[in-house]
Amino acid sequence: MKFIIKSISKNSGRLGHLRIKESSELQTPLLLQTTKGGSIPYLSADVFGLVSREQQVLQLTLCTMDQMAESLDQWNRSLGDYVGYPDYNTLLLLRDPCEVTPSGGNDRDVVPLFTRRGKESLTAERYMQLVTSFAPDVYQGLCDADTNPESTKKRVQKSVDRTERFMQHCFKQHRELERLKDSTLLAPIVGGYNTFARTQSIKHAREQPKGTYGGYIFEGFHTNGIAATSLNPSQLLPIVDHCVQQIEDELPRLMPGAFTPVLMLELIRLGVDIFDTSYAYCAAVNYKALTFSYCIDKEEHSAFLDVTDEAIKEQFTPLLEGCNCLACQKHTRAYIHHLYKTNELLGPILLMIHNLHHYMGFFDVIRDSISADQLPALLDYVRHQNMSTDINYCIEPNNKTVGKAAMGKGFITAAN
């Protein structure tokens, strides 16, 4: 993996070009496509091709794909080809950023992996065996990231010490395993909300020989799922800034999680390069269409449209006026509300089409704003949407009741 910085601005973050293996150059800030079981949620590869024709990077998660390891051992083509996206690069994470990760189960020598079949205790050796089976283009190192703003100093220190032990094995195996010779390792930076612990984690990574890893992944700030949408920026941003100041500029930085658009812009301004689409998914599965504006105008805009709202049942207008996604061009608010009422699978499909299209357009505007050194103006606009107060972008859990006959179909009750 090769990363080239195109420009750096004191107020607007940085632009870069990322090349993974033989792919075309990807522009940063980059948006990864979050998947479940190797698939973009609710969308087939053909349908996603209607959302975007540009080359994407798939963010795969071991907790939703571990059962595929045995068959992947026998697979002699790329991981992207295996999941039906042969032209896409792949990045393998341990945890699913779309779902809350249960706490507990960590020990001196193991990290819990919560799968559909239950909990598996991963040692560093077992983890690298699984990664070798997958042979992704990029993957994260094993870490204890079970920390959040409430974690004690003792718990945070344990996460750093355990991660250091795990990574000693991961660094060594990465250099030796033939099947991973073309893969890039991301060094995890852990330590909760403690600057001293974060410094320790960074120091251990930077002690490794040059070229051992190709970037950083910042972990341990939240427990994934919609918990990431309610993080306190005044707590998070100083810690991220502290980390960014201590790592080299020439390596990309990834932060997985469903961060709000405002917090994401703040993180980009600090120098974080790579994010994912878990926020778009979390909104869709909780009945919300993204309707915030990122094209500065004089109208007031809301963060979401709740498709369960009875007020829209006779609104024969698009989810978002001016949006040219397939959902907005072909269907109306009233129709999508009807799909919710009848528990039709097409409902979440249309919401995912719209939310992904909207979020990818947002990132196009972000890159243009950085290029023009106008990110602060975009941040202020997204934060207020021309209203007198800050817009609330937190995603509330879906508490709608769905009958047993409808379970497994269409809109479902999201996990809290």
Image (cartoon, rainbow, N blue to C red):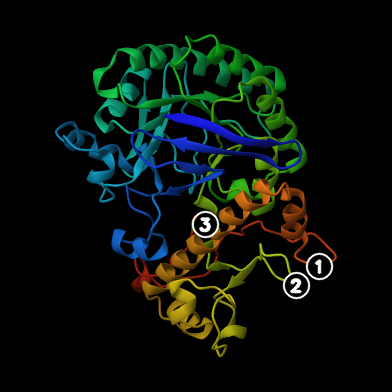
Under mark 1, the amino acid is Met
Mark 2 secondary-structure assignment: loop
Relative to 98, 83 lies left or right: left
Q: Count residues near mark 2 (Cα–Cα under 10 Å), then give few for <14, some for 14-19, many for 20+.
A: few
The residue wearing badge 1 is: 387
Q: Earlier in the sequence, mark 1 or mark 2?
A: 2
Under mark 3, the amino acid is Met
Picture quarter containing residue 362? bottom right
State the CA–CA distance, disc 3 to disc 1: 24 Å
Residue at image x 44%, y 38%? 95
Q: Are marks 1 and 2 in contact (CB under 8 Å)?
A: yes
Image spot of residue 392 (x, y percent)? 72, 60
Q: Earlier in the sequence, mark 2 or mark 3?
A: 2
Image spot of residue 9 (x, y percent)? 71, 37
The residue wearing badge 2 is: 300
The residue wearing badge 3 is: 360
Image spot of residue 105 (x, y percent)? 46, 28
Under mark 2, the amino acid is Glu
Q: In what quadrant of the picture does the N terminus appear?
A: top left
Work out whether 67 lies above or below 36.
above
State the CA–CA distance, disc 1 to disc 2: 6 Å
Residue at image x 59%, y 17%? 201
